[in-house]
Image (cartoon, grey):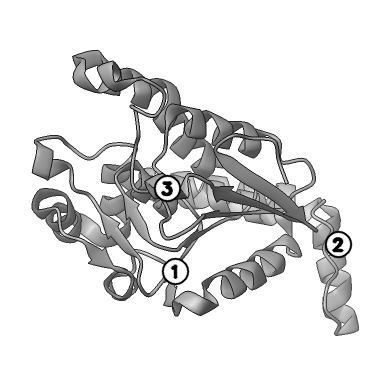
Amino acid sequence: MSDYETILTERQGGVLQIMLNRPERLNAASLEMADELRAALYDLGDARCVLITGAGKGFCSGADLAARGEANAIASRGGSHQALQNHYNPLVSQILRLPVPVITAVNGPAAGVGCSIALAGDFVLAGISAYFLQAFVNIGLVPDGGSTWLLARAIGRARATRMMMLGEKISAGQADEWGLIYKAVEDAALMEEAKALAQRLAEGPTLAFATMKRNISTALDGTINDVFLAEAEGQRAAGASADAMEGGMAFLAKRRPAFTGK
């Protein structure tokens, strides 16, 4: 386990597991938590997959600017802007850009920036009692932390507008039906399924996964010609990897490949 104040980290084989650890606040993301998450994600070491979840009954109930006497930051017009630009936005961006697969196991409310953190994962698993919420409209504010980008691309304009303008809770089952998340599972099975998926990904071709992530981002924002180029360049890099050689040999030998992430 780690020595962080607001998160717990543990390495199990090729998996780095991070637990948001402010259960008394439903893991509301203080500035300190955002910075500690960034530090933990920067220090991947030999991890080939990251699994993020929350302690207690919640995943993350949103930003908490008042966690360490920063109540004035909430009241000031520039406080939230600075918190987003210097802490929360860089965190969500970092999760999206990680060169390894990221799984988020949503075990309760994922609200505000907590929703953004959850949806930034490559695979979002949610316990059946979990929900996703953008409640900014109820206090006259707008969604942030990249949630507008994440929601619009995942579920389209109409449903993203519904979530943001009506401020409705979207259950795990509804999120699954909409394609907002990878899968909704029974609460008791959440961590077992998340860990099994994490282990599977940690044993996969890590360099190829990183290229897939970049190419998906290119596909979301670029043209078909941008994608053609990204795929060709990615294929050249992946084809030169030890994992590609191992994959080819395993295919010819009709055995399961033993990828090393190199």
Disc 2 is placed on an element classified as helix
Q: Which disc is residue 182 wearing? A: 1
* Number of marks drawn: 3
The residue where tag 3 is placed is 24
| Residue 54 position in % (x across, y down) | 50, 54
Residue type at mark 2 is Met
Q: Please identify, in this view, whether the residue under mark 2 or under mark 3 is nearer the observer.
A: 3
Which sits earlier in the primary sequence, circle 3 or circle 1? 3
Q: Is residue 31 above or below residue 199?
A: above
Q: Is residue 262 left or right of residue 21?
A: right
The residue nearer to you, when weighing 52 against 19, is 19
Circle 1/circle 2 CB separation < 8 Å: no
Residue 255 visible in rendering? yes
Given residues 191 and 221, the one toward you in this image is: 191
Please give the name of the residue rendered at 58% of the width and 74% of the height, measured from the top-left corner.
193
Label ID, residue 245: 2
Residue type, numbered disc 3? Glu
Q: Nearer the viewer, residue 224 or 99?
A: 99
